[in-house]
Image: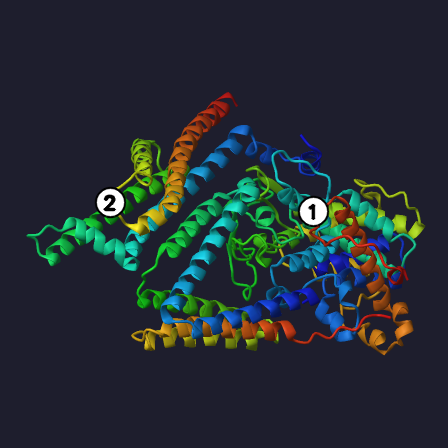
Amino acid sequence: MTRMQRVKETGFGILQILAALSLLLAPKDTSMAVILVIVGISFTAAGIGSLWFYFTMARQMVGGRVSLYKGIILFEMGAIALALTDVSHYYILLYLIILHAFQGLVRTLRALESRRIGAESYKLKLTHGLLDFCLAILCIIFIRQQTTAVLIYASGLFYSAVFRIVSALRKRSFIYIQ
Amino acid sequence: MNQYEETIQKIHDDPVLDALNTPEEVGLRRYRSRLSLDGIGYITFGIWSVVKIIASLFLSTEFYTKMIGYMQTEDEPEELVKLVFGVFIAIVCIMTLLVHFKIGVAAIRYSNGTRKTRGFLFLVLIMIVLTAHGLSTYFTQHDYDIKFLDDTAVASAIADLTGIFILIDMVISASRIKRFRRLQREAKQED
Amino acid sequence: MQMDFHYYATYCAAILAGYSHEESMDICYSAQFVDLCSKTLLGKIGAPAQAATTQLQLELMDGRSDLLAVQESTSIWSSFHFLPGNLHKEKNRRTKLYMDKYRLVCMPNGELVKKTVQLAMGQSLQHVGIAMHVLADTWAHMFFAGTPSLVINNVTTGDFYEMKEDGTQSRIFFRHNPSVPDDPEKNLYTNSLYQSSETSVMNLGHGRAGHLPDYSYLKYRYLPAWSDYRMVLKDNPSDYMHAFCQMIYALKKLRAGDDDIRTEIYDTDAIAGYEERIDGILKKRQLIACDDWKAFGEELSGMAIPDFDIETYQEEYMQAAPDQKEETFLGRFIRAALAQKRMVCEEIQSTGNLLTGIPMRRRKKDKK
């Protein structure tokens, strides 16, 4: 990682920690609304990104239309998430369960593939993946409790920030020719 | 031919490749790919429409309670209204899926040559008219006041416009495929 | 290309160009080392990371897909493995974003390959080896770009057909199972997974076509993402033969110190009497042809060719004093790699393309 990338990653990690703390300290209703807004903005941004990619590049590609359809659907998903104001906490938990379970699966598979080719960083990835699974399980166990959604989302932000900062600050030793 | 294509030509002068890259072959490949993707896209949009309907009902209690409220009269018990509403929604979802799958699968089969007739385009034209008509309802005043629908009107309109775009493209692609197949047959007969 | 061509075939080309056995060994070792000189290895021996000529799979997997990572990847892969054929290509109705990537598509006989050989003129044998690696790869890796790009490097996997000598065509099938070797008998090969992200590492180079460009026996047609629905033909036996003859031509020029380098010239006279043998090696249906090329090389020179050992020169470099490192084998290789990378990146940047980084004036201390 270059110095600029390290600074960027550390800064983003600190922002994530601050966001997690704000969610925990704010009233439950505000926190739920904030989670919905973050989810909505993420999807909308992903949709706009996909549409921009289609109109600038993928239009000229064989089979590039997929980006257009993906963009429209993501954009609409984001708009729906932003329009929701009175969602029961069960649905937010369902979203978090699916998100963390999927992320956990992907990270664990990538960690195993890294281990197979001899990369040392597989332990960090594997830990990250297993933590995602734990969060998904915790969501299921504590599904009836109102504050679970906020706690899980905030902890997701928090440990993601920790991993990001640890990854950014890991030593790389290179000696340059004089 | 630009310099890039000249380089390719010089290195790889192959009659088999020439036969694969005639204007008819290239055109056929282009429109078959477009029609196939249109079919997949339309099926995806159909699934997404159903997911949207169900998600809107479950995630927005405002939407659900107001719809039930508008359907219910003084004499009917709420459970009956909910049941009828549920059946109505189920029928709408199934019909949506059926139509989208029918059109999408037909488009994919026509693109890969499994299906020879273009009868599905009749259904496509009907869907273009219905979807276009549906677009206008996003922006007209309604008797029922559901904020959720108002907030998502623009996004839904864009999605429906894309659906119309896909359907129109299906018509164009299917026509071009027919034309290029005819040109291909004529070229083979001349040989 | 693989070790069979970069190491053994380069040795054969160097012998045919008139180099001695020892000189040919230095050249072919350097040519093969380009595929192994990663940041990880350089870090291990205490060498500058900027001299990396490749990225290992684990480095790519740990890597990111932001702009800086894309620039780093592009500067390495475009400089050593996917040398752009024409940085001034034009195509109608394309955005600058698209054209920046389209212009990085690797093609042989471009202006850059001429400059690569000229850059090696009067330089060390290690530099000659690097130039031969780059030249050879322009033939194997043509039609792909050394930058992660879905819109350029993606392929339609259902449209791959092998074109056999008897005129028949058989479909090529792909799977994503890197632990299982490719099966030429069943036409079953491994490729990278489809990833819809433009800058995913799965879309770097010829990953989507698997190792097909590296197998000298394969002649196949397929549909690349950039081709406007026109099929392209990849005739590896012919391309590899062109690469071999062009390497001999370039090596003769380098040995004579004649910097009048021209493209589209292939020294077919040098292989007189050996055409059938070489053709046989190239067309033999095998995943790696090291044994055949090695046998041919040993016949040509009458000397034994040692197997490639990545650690041969590492100890020498690590033990050398700091002011003596540049005179070691790897020190000369590193200097040559830095020069090649700088040349290619500056050429790309001079066209306004920032995919290899933002141009900087060289500081005085870099000019040493």
Residue C140 image position (x, y, % from top left)? 69, 50
Residue toward you, A121 or A56:
A56
Q: Residue at x 49, y 49 (%)?
A: A48
Which residue is the extreme one toward the left? Answer: B75
Q: Which mark is residue B95?
A: 2
Q: Is residue B175 above or below residue A52?
A: above
Residue toward you, A172 or B54:
B54
Q: Is residue C321 above or below residue C73?
A: below
Q: Callout 2: residue from which chain?
A: B
Residue A10 image position (x, y, % from top left)? 61, 70
**Horizontal arrangement in the rendering, residue B119 relative to residue C259 (left or right):** left
Q: Which mark is residue C106?
A: 1
Q: Residue at x 89, y 48 (%)?
A: C253
Looking at the rendered structure, the secondary structure element under dot 2 is: helix
Corner quadrant of residue C94: top right
Q: Which mark is residue C141?
A: none
Give the colour scheme of this rendering: rainbow
**Horizontal arrangement in the rendering, residue C333 relative to residue B100 (left or right):** right
Q: Residue at x 6, y 52 (%)?
A: B75
Q: Is residue C258 above or below residue A99?
A: above
Q: Callout 1: residue from which chain?
A: C
Q: CA–CA distance between discs 2 and 1? A: 50 Å
Residue C134 image position (x, y, % from top left)? 76, 53
**Horizontal arrangement in the rendering, residue A136 relative to residue C89 (left or right):** left
Examine the rendering and report whether any part of residue A61 can be seen: no
Q: Which amino acid type is marked by label 1?
A: Cys
Residue toward you, C203 or C143:
C203
**Horizontal arrangement in the rendering, residue C246 relative to residue A130 (left or right):** right
Examine the rendering and report whether any part of residue C343 can be seen: yes
